[in-house]
């Protein structure tokens, strides 16, 4: 493994019995006994590690968003195709039980055609110190953009976004986004860094209205709470809960699926690089809509 902070890499290697720590991604990608690489660099630094891994014949898992520029994502996809390697973006919600169950019911026809989707993804102030390096619509909201595309199964043709900047020294702290799909479906999305730091859990919510019913996902109401002398706690039972010293939940399902695709030498179907690019186009169009203060058409690649 490798990390920009060598001391952190050494600690993780010791903790997880990783036999070797190298000084950079190029050295890692050159190792003959490495079959696959996970790229979890800052969002705007995905391109070079991904291309290096693919050039050396490695399969690649790259955290979301696949890139911060369309041209970079397209370069990755072309390189993966040229080397016949897996390039899988980390859109974890496709592996979370509640979100995946709704998709299955839509695919089976039980819910009918999607008419509208409302999504909310709210995070506490303290996380902004690390993750505000990337615009909110790319860092957090892209999760729900991807799910909306997955559920509706149609392209987004136009978007409108509104950002609220509270700090004035960086990216927005709150975004509202409106998506219009080719078949007439509407998506509405709220994302923010403005939850109080003592909020006991992430406030993630989605309601899907279809011709035949309504599906509601509420991550905050997880069904598990702890009341203790020092406060109220709602532990994560969805994304990456740790039990018996190991990760469970959607994160484990996602990484196990990628590993299985590598072992069986088959391209992933639950999430593809092309779908990661599609979500990126929508997110970047929303950013442009906010910047220009107008409705913006989404370019179709």
Image (cartoon, rainbow, N blue to C red):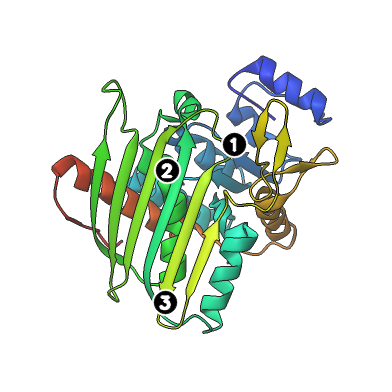
Percent position of residue 276, x then y: 45, 55
Q: Nearer the viewer, mark 2 or mark 3?
A: 3
Q: Are marks 1 and 3 in contact (CB under 8 Å)?
A: no
| Residue that sits furthest to the top in the current view | 7
Label 2, residues with CA under 10 Å away: few <14, some 14-19, many ≥20? many
Please indicate, yes or no, whether residue 46 appears anywhere in the rendered image: no
In percent of the image, x 57 and y 59: which residue is there? Answer: 94
Q: Residues within 10 Å of mark 3 (few under 14, many from 20)?
A: some
In the rendered image, the quadrant that contains the C terminus is bottom left
Residue 93 position, x and y percent, is 56, 55
Indicate which disc, 1 or 3, sits on the residue closer to the N terminus. 1
Q: Quadrant of the N terminus?
A: top right
Residue on which the image places disc 3? 210
Identify the residue under disc 2: 67
Query: In this rendering, would 19 be left or right of 163?
Result: right
Q: Secondary structure at mark 1?
A: loop
Q: CA distance from mark 2 to mark 3?
A: 32 Å
Q: Is residue 227 visible?
A: yes
| Front of the two marks 1 and 3 | 1
Residue found at x 59% / y 47%: 61
Q: CA distance from mark 1 to mark 3?
A: 31 Å
Name the secondary structure under disc 3: strand
On screen, residue 183 above or below 145? below
Q: Where, by quadrant of the figure, is residue 13 drawn?
A: top right
Total tally of numbered discs in the picture: 3
Q: Residue at x 57, y 36 (%)?
A: 40
Please tell me whether mark 2 sits on a helix, a strand or a loop.
Answer: loop
Residue receiving disc 1: 200
């Amino acid at each position: 493994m490798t990390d920009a902070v060598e001391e952190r890499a050494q600690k993780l290697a010791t903790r997880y019995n990783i036999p070797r720590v190298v000084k950079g991604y190029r050295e890692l990608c050159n190792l003959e006994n490495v079959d696959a690489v996970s790229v979890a660099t800052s969002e705007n630094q995905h391109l070079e590690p991904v291309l290096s891994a693919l050039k050396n014949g490695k399969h690649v898992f790259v955290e979301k968003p696949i890139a911060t520029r369309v041209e970079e994502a397209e370069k990755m996809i072309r390189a993966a195709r040229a080397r016949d390697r897996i390039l899988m973006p980390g859109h974890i919600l496709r592996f979370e039980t509640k979100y995946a169950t709704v998709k299955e019911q839509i695919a089976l026809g039980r819910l009918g055609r999607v008419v509208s989707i409302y999504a909310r993804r709210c995070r506490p102030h303290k996380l902004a110190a690390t993750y505000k390096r990337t615009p909110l619509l790319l860092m957090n909201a892209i999760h729900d953009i991807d799910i909306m595309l997955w559920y509706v199964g149609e392209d987004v043709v136009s978007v409108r976004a509104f950002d609220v900047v509270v700090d004035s020294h960086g990216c927005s702290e709150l975004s509202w986004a409106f998506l219009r799909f080719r078949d007439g479906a509407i998506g509405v999305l709220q994302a923010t860094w403005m939850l109080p730091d003592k909020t006991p859990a992430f406030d993630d919510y989605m309601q899907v209205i279809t011709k035949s019913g309504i599906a509601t996902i509420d991550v905050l109401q997880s069904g598990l709470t702890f009341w203790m002398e020092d406060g109220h706690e709602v532990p994560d039972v969805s994304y990456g809960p740790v039990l018996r010293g190991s990760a469970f939940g959607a994160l484990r399902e996602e990484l196990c699926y990628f590993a299985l695709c590598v072992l069986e030498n088959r391209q992933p179907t639950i999430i593809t690089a092309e779908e990661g690019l599609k979500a990126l186009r929508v997110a970047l169009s929303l950013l442009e809509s906010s910047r220009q203060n107008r409705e913006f058409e989404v370019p179709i690649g």
